[in-house]
Amino acid sequence: MSSMDAAASVDLADLGLDEGGHLLVDRALDGLAPGRRLAVTGRHPALGVHLGPWCRSRGHRLIAGDAALVVEKGGSAERRWAGAERAGSAAGPPDARADPRWGLAARGALVEAGGPPIGAHWSEREHVWADIAPKLYAAAAAAQWDPATAVDWTAPIDAVPPEIERAVIQIMTYLVENEQAALIIPARLLSQLHPHYREVMQLLATQAADEARHVEVFTRRGLLSGRPLGTSSAGGRASLATLLNEPDFSTASFLLSVLGEGTFLDLLRFLYGHAPDPVTADVTRLALRDEARHVAFGVAHTAHLAGSDPAYLGTLRRSVERRHAALQDTAGLNAEVFDSLVLLAAGSWQPTAIRRGWQAVRDLQARMDEGRRRRLAAIGFPDDEAAELSALHTRNFM
Ligand SMILES: [Fe+2]
Ligand SMILES: [Fe+2]
């Protein structure tokens, strides 16, 4: 046998197989069909010793030639990738169904058969997707702010009258509890989402990070004057528990983001407008900006789903009714939170000021209702049903 029988050749010069030489051999074999031969030449003293075991480990056959070493290509590499398939398309939109066998592979990767399937619960595009998700993720990534520097924590709060400060602390205490629920829900949905829907996964991660910052800045504002935090009511926590217990991705997104966070947009705007100090103004303004994205995804996703399956509006409707029935015997909003909102808008204990504050909170509730009806209509509910469902929303706002 002579090296002339080989279909191709490669020269490793003085490079050893134990220092990267196998890359050159692999590259040369790549263009050959199984059964074809490659002549390997080189000056490394151990080349002949190393090539035999390497060939066996890769399923090739080493044939001792007279002038050169000859490798006959095996078929195991081809066999290994025979059952492989692409995990959807990297450039195109995600697939309608994500195969659990794709597991953690990048979208568009060539996936070797075998390997553990991923135990994701949400693996259908319609159940998690919105076309705006990639854009919202990019906006969220660009808008991350640093709580240490985005808020001027040294701004004076001494001018805030003690009873107004107590109202601010009560509201902050309430906000933290709601933000914690708003953090846990996207984090839980994220852990059950097939990573094929990468942009939704990334968006939920930024949403959880947003809520982590909200928990931080509201806690910090609540503690700023050194007084103890306010109260947490059983009714408020019962209302949030019904959100945490919602198992369906889209229904959870609807109840939390469309109705709850949608209502919070008006609440945060109200708090910003009546902030008695710059720190309260900063933290509510920053949270408001983030919440607008959370609401945008919730509305876009549920509208997308209802658009492809009109019967889904019935499912969403029943989720609101179910939640309302579950909370019927609870107080909903902590009365101390309501009173604190009145006092904050009043700014003082003068009866005329209290009347003004009371009216401001009634106006706030009317704006919240209007916003909910508008978002419900955007999803596809007729106006009368939107009004009915908005009225059934929890008194706890979130
Ligand atoms: Fe938040
Ligand atoms: Fe949020």
Image: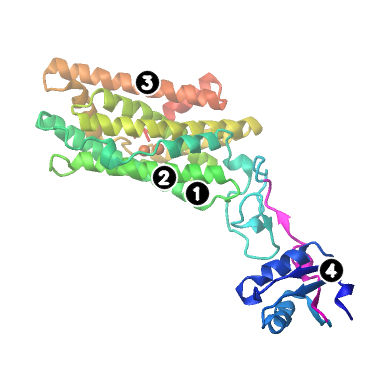
* Residue 280 showing in the rendered view: yes
Q: Quadrant of residue 6?
A: bottom right
Q: Is residue 149 magenta?
A: no
Q: Which mark is residue 208?
A: 2
Q: Quadrant of residue 354?
A: top left
- Marks 1 and 4 sit apart, C-alpha to C-alpha, by 45 Å
On the image, the x and y values in percent for residue 385 come to: 52, 24
Quarter of the image that includes the C terminus:
top left
| Residue of label 1 | 190
Quarter of the image that includes the N terminus:
bottom right
Q: Nearer the viewer, mark 3 or mark 4?
A: 4
Name the amino acid, label 1: Leu
Ligand 2 in which quarter:
top left
* Residue 234 showing in the rendered view: no
Say which of 65 and 280 sits in front: 65
| Residue of label 4 | 34
Magenta span: 67-89
- Marks 1 and 2 sit apart, C-alpha to C-alpha, by 9 Å
| Residue of label 3 | 367
- Mark 1 and mark 3 lie on one chain; the one further toward the N terminus is 1
Q: Is residue 74 magenta?
A: yes
- Mark 2 and mark 4 lie on one chain; the one further toward the N terminus is 4
- Marks 2 and 4 sit apart, C-alpha to C-alpha, by 51 Å
Mark 1 vs 2: CB contact within 8 A: yes
Mark 3 vs 4: CB contact within 8 A: no
Judged left or right of residue 389, residue 215 is left
Q: At x 37% / y 20%, what residue is drawn?
A: 367
